[in-house]
Amino acid sequence: MARKWKIVVAALAIAVVVGLISFHSLRERVRRLSQAQSVEEQARREVLAPPITTPTDVTVAAKLFLAAAPDQLAPVTIQLPLSADPVQRSKQILHALIASAPTAEQRTLPADAELLGFYVLPDGTAIADFSDALVSEIPSGILSEQMTVDSIVQTLENNVPALRRLKILIHGQEAETLAGHLDLTGYFELNPPADQASAPPGDNSSQTPPGQPPAVNPPVPPAASPAAKSIPAPQSTTKP
Amino acid sequence: MLVHQAPSAPSPATGAPQSAPSQQPSAAQALPAQSGYTGPVIVLDPAHGGTDPGARGQNGPIEKDVVLQFARVARVELVRQGYRVVMTRDDDSNPSYDDRAAFANSYHDAIFVTLHISSTGTAGTARAYFYQFWSSFPPQSKSAAPDAGETNPPAPANPTPVSSLIPWNEAQRKYADASHRLADQLQIQLAQPFSGSPTLSKAAAIRGLRSVAAPAVAIEISSVTDTNGASFTAMATPLAVSISKGIQAFRPANSAGAK
């Protein structure tokens, strides 16, 4: 082999080795940056909304309903200390839903969304008050808005059995829609009675025959639910 | 707010809903009705518009423009199949939800199809949605199930017939089953050209459907994030054909009366 070819091969080999080292280093930097961002977000969240602890907390396998595909939710089980009190338990589980998505792709609520308040009325009606970020930072569209609401509904349904229906407020106010599509003026069904629960939770496809309500239901309009316009005094007003 | 419930017998589409919102889309957008036409009026609703762009892609596509293009192509296809077609907007205006519903409700025997583009979902898939009310929980409104101990107001001596009036916010309730069937038919057709789409329609509380007093569905195509303008243009004809076939399966063009 001519000398000049040997030099070319050697140069190429050196270039490959340098490239591999650089690539590995670059990947490490990206990973560290990602971790730093996550830690920063977690720290910010802990300042704004410190973890809720109550005397009745018991660590259980909680189910968070997170995105498993662009149009599909799936339960992710995490060990979480949860209170016996439905209000505190709901706050704990919703905080976890916002903060504990393992990856960005699994996230169903915006990272900046905050639960400002959670109330439970004696009849099992739950009222969740979220910050504006839930509206402003959610991707626009029926699919994404439905995923967000289903994620909240199914997570509450599977972890707080005392709840019967859910009203979502945005910054203390009734919102006409979540982000331009999904109707928030009524209530979402939680834990329907056994004789009405014909479909599995969250399965609101038309597998149910016409006329048969799905497990996760659209809100009942205000005309059929006067409480939507005037919310009675909450059972608990403790802020998270 | 109440909406006038259309009579069962076919009649000219001249009635406006009672207490209808003020800014209705122009009736001039309606194509002239064919002589002797007895079929449904297809109301195509390109979502968003004006200052509301809807979903916006990084590479240019804007939902309000894409859905307007979709609606125009669908209108041509539906007219070709013999339907009478109107659109809630045919420009860059943005009628409110109630204005769009009022426009649809002003036509007797309408079928309402609102078109959307999502920000998420697998690119090139399509979904049909219908609005479904929960009927047994929470308890019925006071007029249907008064609270215990509450005294009912005395019945008026000369009661006004209310059978033709339904609450504006519940206009869709009577049509929930029909909307469900229509969404199923549309989803079957959409699943063919839009591979990877679900085979079943879905229930969703879509605000734009709630006050429509007619079979009403929303179709959403995914997604503005992963699809460029040329790809959306290529989707327009398959979407139009799917809508036409779905409506044809639900309600042939020259069939009279509500299905």
Image: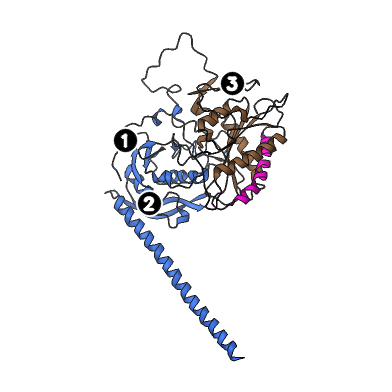
Distance between the alpha carbons at the discs numbered 2 and 1: 23 Å
Within-10-Å neighbours for mark 2: few <14, some 14–19, many 20+: some
* Picture residue at 49% right of the left edge, 28% below the top: B169
Q: Give the farthest residue toward the left.
A: A55
Q: Which residue is mark 1?
A: A234
Look at the magenta stretch and give its main secondary structure. Answer: helix
The segment highlighted magenta reads B221-250
Residue B92 position within the rendered picture, expressed as x and y whole percent measured from the top left: 55, 38
Residue A46 against residue B55 in the figure, above or below? below
The answer to whether residue A49 shows anywhere in this view is: no
Q: Which residue is mark 3?
A: B15
Query: What chain is the brown one?
Result: B
User: What is the image's colouring?
Assistant: by chain
Numbered disc 3: what chain? Answer: B
Q: Amino acid at mark 3?
A: Gly
Task: Please name the color used to draw chain A.
Answer: blue
